[in-house]
């Protein structure tokens, strides 16, 4: 049923993100010109200054300390921090996030004892080749072709143990992404044979069958072998598990029925050498875990107590705080701006009122919504 009310608003002037910047710049520029706001581009904050449990400023990379009555962390997510990502999400990082998504705000907060929210809510985008060595970026040009309605699959998907984990022809990418969360390291391999490479539509965007064949052993994550056991060894899959899954799947093809996952597109067995395995990582755009905050965006410790002088807004509180474990269009940028605005207004009102602790400011703003619910 079509929506009665438009659910998406598209910028009509400049497309995409620049339209948002455009609107914000018009609000910010007069304050910059009047000297009420000072921007320090290129300054990286490396520590919070605390006195008797209260945050009283920040220290920058070059050692400069900036005293402040309150600090608002708005440092974004950790989609470019492989160590934090592995620790909090338990998967290798293949990312589309900006290199500035270093998780600095999370590290600063955790160093001061703040709690986390949104753990276990991560939802990956399905899927991408592992990045080239020494890189984190997903290669969108050569992304595996995993959308079943666009390319009915000839391959099986197996996890590290060699087990299938989903109906590969499920038309819902959302269901596949949710199933992916449950497998080891959210990493899987497309496994197929020579006939599939010949007869399927291209397995990987931008590569013909011949090009994929040529990439085996040269491009990280793309493997080929004359038998299933050797393929498993090359790809890092459990060989016994893979042999068993291939045999089982081939029996389902012969019977015309997938007794494990109900897959209905069963064009051919995986039987004609050479055999291929293409590794897929979960792809990250946003990170779901973040600093725990109360309904006034004040950062909380692990025991629930508010840390005086410290606020957090945007992806640093974790996308799950406003999205749950789902991708909701626009529900990262707009809450970041909305909660930032609410905190800014409350702090400004408090500063104007004078004589009252600025850390209590947000409690007087009224009407703020709890971003953690
Ligand atoms: C490919 C892609 C597409 C997306 N599409 C959408 C979409 O359509 N809709 C949507 O709502 N969201 C989308 N998102 C998510 C959205 O872009 C982010 O969630 C959002 O930008 C987060 O805003 P933020 O202000 O919290 O953090 P950021 O925009 O990441 O800004 C954080 C800033 O803090 C700075 N910083 C970090 N650490 C420090 C430090 N230690 N000291 C000083 N400064 C620091 C960074 O340099 C950066 O400028 C997308 C993300 C990606 C990667």
Image (tube, rainbow, N blue to C red):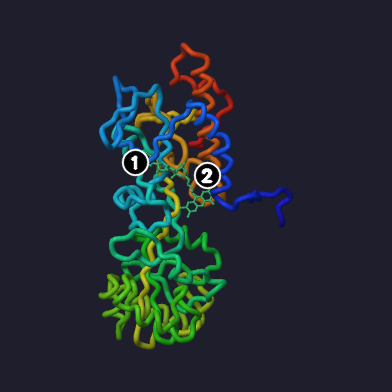
Q: Is residue 137 above or below residue 114?
A: below
Q: Is residue 149 left or right of residue 293?
A: right
Q: What residue lies at 35% left-to-right and 65% top-to-bottom?
A: 130
Q: Is mark 1 within 8 Å of ligand 1?
A: yes
Upstream in sequence: badge 1 or badge 2? 1
* Residue 1: percent from left, percent from top: 71, 57
Residue 238 seen in render = yes
Task: Specify the label residue 95 is tagged with.
Answer: none
Q: Is mark 2 within 8 Å of ligand 1?
A: yes
Which of the 4 quarters of the picture holds residue 301? top left
* Residue 275: percent from left, percent from top: 35, 82
Q: What residue lies at 66% left-to-right and 49% top-to-bottom?
A: 7
* Label 2 CA crowd tier, 10 Å (few <14, some 14–19, many 20+): some
Residue 8 seen in render = no
Q: What residue lies at 40% left-to-right and 70% top-to-bottom?
A: 164
Q: Secondary structure at mark 2?
A: helix
Q: Is residue 341 above or below residue 215?
A: above
* Label 1 CA crowd tier, 10 Å (few <14, some 14–19, many 20+): many
Residue tagged 2: 333
Q: Is residue 149 above or below residue 23?
A: below
Q: Secondary structure at mark 1?
A: helix
Q: What residue lies at 50% left-to-right and 80% top-to-bottom?
A: 201
Rounded to the nearest whole Å, what is the CA distance between mark 1 and mark 2? 19 Å
Q: Nearer the viewer, residue 228 or 321?
A: 321
Q: Nearer the viewer, residue 143 or 178?
A: 143
Residue tagged 1: 104
């Amino acid at each position: 049923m079509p929506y009665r009310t438009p659910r998406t608003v598209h910028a009509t002037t400049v497309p995409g993100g620049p339209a948002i910047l455009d609107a914000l710049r018009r609000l910010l520029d007069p304050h910059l010109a009047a000297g009420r706001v000072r921007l320090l581009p290129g300054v990286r904050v490396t520590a919070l200054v605390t006195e008797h449990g209260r945050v009283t400023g920040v220290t920058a990379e070059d050692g400069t300390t900036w005293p402040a009555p309150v600090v608002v962390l708005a440092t974004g997510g950790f989609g470019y921090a492989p160590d934090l990502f592995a620790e909090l999400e338990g998967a290798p990082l293949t990312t589309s996030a900006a290199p500035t998504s270093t998780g600095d705000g999370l590290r600063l907060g955790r160093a001061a004892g703040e709690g986390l929210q949104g753990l276990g809510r991560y939802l990956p985008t399905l899927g991408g080749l592992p990045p080239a060595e020494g890189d984190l970026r997903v290669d969108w040009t050569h992304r595996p072709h995993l959308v079943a309605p666009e390319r009915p699959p000839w391959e099986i998907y197996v996890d590290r143990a060699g087990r299938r984990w989903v109906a590969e022809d499920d038309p819902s990418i959302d269901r596949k992404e949710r199933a992916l969360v449950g497998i080891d390291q959210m990493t899987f391999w497309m496994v197929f044979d020579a006939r599939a490479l010949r007869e399927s539509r291209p397995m990987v965007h931008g590569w013909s069958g011949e090009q994929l064949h040529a990439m085996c052993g040269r491009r990280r994550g793309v493997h080929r072998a004359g038998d299933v056991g050797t393929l498993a060894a090359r790809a890092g899959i459990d060989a016994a598990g893979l042999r068993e899954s291939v045999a089982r799947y081939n029996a389902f093809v012969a019977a015309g029925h997938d007794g494990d996952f109900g897959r209905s597109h069963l064009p051919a067995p995986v039987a004609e050498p050479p055999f291929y395995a293409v590794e897929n990582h979960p792809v990250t755009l946003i990170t779901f875990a973040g600093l725990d905050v109360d309904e006034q965006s004040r950062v909380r410790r692990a025991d629930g107590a508010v840390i005086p002088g410290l606020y957090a807004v945007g992806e640093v509180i974790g996308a799950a705080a406003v999205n749950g474990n789902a991708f909701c269009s626009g529900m990262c940028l707009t809450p970041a701006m909305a909660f930032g605005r609410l905190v800014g207004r409350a702090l400004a009102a408090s500063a104007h009122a004078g004589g009252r602790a600025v850390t209590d400011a947000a409690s007087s703003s009224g009407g703020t919504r709890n971003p953690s619910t």
